[in-house]
Amino acid sequence: MFEDIAKRMHKTRENGLYLSDLEIEILEKYHVDYRQYPTMESLLLAIERTIQQEEIDALDLEELASTIAEYRYYHEMKR
């Protein structure tokens, strides 16, 4: 149970992105290397491109895109 909680905790990664281990596992599943993207916006665009290109059900990736978009809205957008 504690391992599951730890996987869901967000951490600032070496490139400055704020992602959990679980989110990174989802990205790796679809071969999206988060280290290539300097911003959450560029990562979100890469995820959206991957969703459009995949011919399989990528519900977990779609949920991740939604989570990142929500994060950007509340933490990165200037109000």
Image: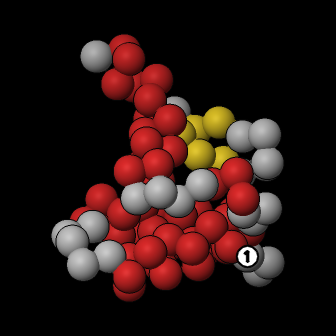
Dividing the image into 4 quarters, which one contains the N terminus?
top left
Relative to residue 49, is residue 61 drawn left or right? left
In the rendered view, tell whether residue 7 sits above or below residue 62.
Answer: above
Query: Residue at coordinates 25% horizontally, 66% vertically from top-left?
Result: 59
As drawn, the residue found furthest toward the left would be: 57
Q: Residues within 10 Å of mark 1 (few under 14, many from 20)?
A: few
In the rendered view, tell whether residue 3 sits above or below residue 10.
Answer: above
Residue 13: which quarter of the image?
top right
Dividing the image into 4 quarters, which one contains the C terminus?
bottom right
- Estimate the x, y position of residue 68 in percent, counting from the top left: 53, 64
As drawn, the residue found furthest toward the bottom would be: 52
Residue 23 in sight: no
Q: Nearer the viewer, residue 72 or 44?
A: 44
Q: Nearer the viewer, residue 6 or 38?
A: 38
Residue 2: which quarter of the image?
top left
Residue 24 in sight: yes
- Estimate the x, y position of residue 26 in percent, counting from the top left: 40, 50
- Estimate the x, y position of residue 58 in percent, counting from the top left: 27, 67
Q: Nearer the viewer, residue 61 or 12?
A: 61
Query: Residue at coordinates 50% horizontally, 71% vertically from top-left?
Result: 47
Query: Residue at coordinates 72% horizontally, 59% vertically from top-left?
Result: 36
In the rendered view, tell whether residue 69 sits above or below residue 35.
Answer: below
Residue type pointed to by label 1 = Met
Query: Residue at coordinates 38% horizontally, 17% vertically from top-left?
Result: 3
Circle 1 sits in a helix, a strand or a loop, which is it?
Answer: loop
Residue 12: which quarter of the image?
top right
**Tag 1 residue:** 77
As drawn, the residue found furthest toward the top would be: 2
